[in-house]
Image: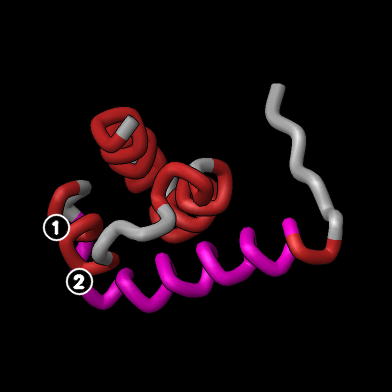
Amino acid sequence: MIQEIKAAISRAADRNQKIAMFHYQVLKNASELEGLDAKAFCREIAVRETYATEFAKMIALARLMREEGAKLTWN
């Protein structure tokens, strides 16, 4: 999964959508990513460690959505 996320973000960077894809991938995979060290995750997918804040925001959003009963569906 990590390599798939890394590849998706790399492709998105070519379209100037790197941060949007980062948000999407973290939100989409939040249940599997919860508990990971944010900075280590950022290093592993080759984005700046400053993205760790965005990682934490998306994990928190996913948690809130679950608590509120909101569901995202993926095709």
Residue position marked by numbered label 1 in the rendering: 43
Residue position marked by numbered label 2 in the rendering: 49
Q: Which residues are magenta?
A: 47-66
Q: x%, y% of residue 61? A: 63, 67
Element carrying mark 1: helix
Element carrying mark 2: helix
Spatial CA span between label 1 and label 2: 7 Å
Relative to 70, residue 59 above or below: below
Other residues around mark 1 within 10 Å, as few (<14) / some (14–19) / many (≥20): few
- Indicate the quadrant containing the C terminus: top left, top right, bottom left or bottom right: top right
Q: x%, y% of residue 74? A: 69, 29
Relative to 73, residue 42 above or below: below
Q: x%, y% of residue 26? A: 47, 51
Residues 75 and 67: in front is: 67
Q: x%, y% of residue 54? A: 43, 71
Name the residue at 83% across, 54% down: 70
Mark 1 and mark 2 in contact? Answer it, CB < 8 Å: yes
Name the residue at 35% across, 37% down: 5
Give amino acid for label 2: Glu
Other residues around mark 2 within 10 Å, as few (<14) / some (14–19) / many (≥20): some
Locate residue 19: give its quadrant: bottom left
User: Horizontally, is 44 left or right of 21 in the view?
Assistant: left
Name the residue at 38% across, 78% down: 53
